[in-house]
Image (cartoon, rainbow, N blue to C red):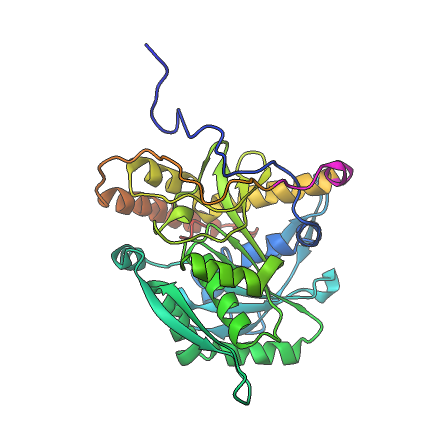
Amino acid sequence: MGQCQCFPCNPVSNPKFMGTPGPLPKPWREMLNGGQIMTALLLCSSFSEKYKGRDMKLGALASIKLPTTLTEMRVTSPVLRWRVGSKETAVLIWVGDSSQGDKVVYAAFNPLRRKQQFLQLLAARGNLVDATFVQEGEGDERESYSVRLFSYIHKKLDNLWRKYKFEQVMLEVVEAYPSHKIVFCGLSHGAALAQAALFRLALVRPNIQVQAVTWNAYKWTDAKGVNLFDRKIGNRLLTFVLSRKQYWDSISGAPPGLASMNEIIFLDAETGETRPSLYVPDSKISPESVWRMYDLHFAKTALTATRLLMTTSLGQPSLLERMASMKWPIERRASLSILQLPFDQNHVLHALQEQEEEQKQLDLDSSERTEEMDSSDDGF
């Protein structure tokens, strides 16, 4: 018999949209080694409102363990200062532990909390709506921007601004911590909303300099919106997509027809290797895309891969310094043929149900321990 041709036995080989492996750009590598990137991921997953953060009061501390070498750990304790929004628009804003040299304010965007919210995303089918953002200020010279946003993200972003006064809260943050970096962070839905919030804030309040680090964001605008994002944000976004050898998280390629960010970092879940890409290919609903989602999309995999990336960087700093910088692929927006098979969305619901059952068991187990539960999250 010949070699099995099914997925994942025969994944896409040598995808041309991925570049040469290499270390992160220097400013982000410094945040990786300093623990801020790992802290951001834990705050938007383990300590999100979906999990530990739900019952935490303002002033509460998050106890986060970070590697300092391959074998040693340290504890950093960000403090919760603001809560904004609710459910899938919830943002918990933390101030880094100054005793550990962490001068970062983290705005951690919540992942989806219920399957019904995922069904709402499916129902939206990638529909785009028009949005207009006007730069704040006085006079007639204020810039006005017309962009198209994924309807689900547009609705949540509007709630965040109009109902929950997110922009005003950010002004309070800047006033309270003028010497701190501000970093938006999120996983999956939280990642997409963090990117969109960064975009809107950059358009209406260009004087507020914010960075963002995200994992497995879905797509939320078109090519014109991405190009405007690049002009206004530049290198202030670090966006990871989880991968494993020659395949990657399928949710990051959805909804099909929308545009991904122009500079993506594929983070290998097995090795911690980082490879750059100029885009994420479209994902279509199929059994293999569900399998890729189940394998790579959730927080447990992101936490493992990011910790591996950090420990590798800490353990081999001289090697990383000698490595060539990432080489971005020349080919842009190339088409990629992906296996597409008939599909029933019950496959998706089944996968999510399994994740929920696993999470319930993990939560029960973790209640008997006092150590950090960063391996117990499977947020979407």
Question: Residue at the spot x=29%, y=43% of the render?
Answer: 285
Compared to residue 159, the image places residue 294 above or below, namely above
- Give x and y (percent) for residue 307: 60, 44
372 horizontally vs 191: left or right: right
Q: Is residue 242 left or right of residue 286?
A: right
Q: Residue furthest right?
A: 318
Left or right placement of residue 162 versus residue 43 in this view? left
Whole-percent x, y for residue 184 in the image: 55, 63
Horizontally, residue 323 falls left or right of residue 39, namely: right
Q: Which residue is drawn at 29% across and 39% down?
A: 286
Check residue 53 for magenta coloring: no
Q: Quadrant of residue 223?
A: bottom left
Given residues 127 and 195, the one toward you in this image is 127
Q: Is residue 110 visible?
A: no
The image quadrant where one finds the N terminus is top left
Judge whether residue 321 is colored magenta. Answer: yes
Q: Which residue lies furthest to the top in this view?
A: 1
Question: Where 77 sits versus 350, above or below?
Answer: below
> Could you say where residue 106 lies in the image, as x and y percent from the top left?
59, 65
What residue lies at 41% left-to-right and 60% top-to-bottom? 221
| Count of labels in the image | 0
The answer to whether residue 230 is above or below residue 22 is: below
Q: Magenta stretch: give its range.
A: 317-327
Q: Which residue lies furthest to the bottom in this view?
A: 139
Q: Position of residue 267 (x, y in %)?
A: 55, 42
| Up/down of 86 relative to 274, above or below | below
Pick the front one: 362 or 279:
279
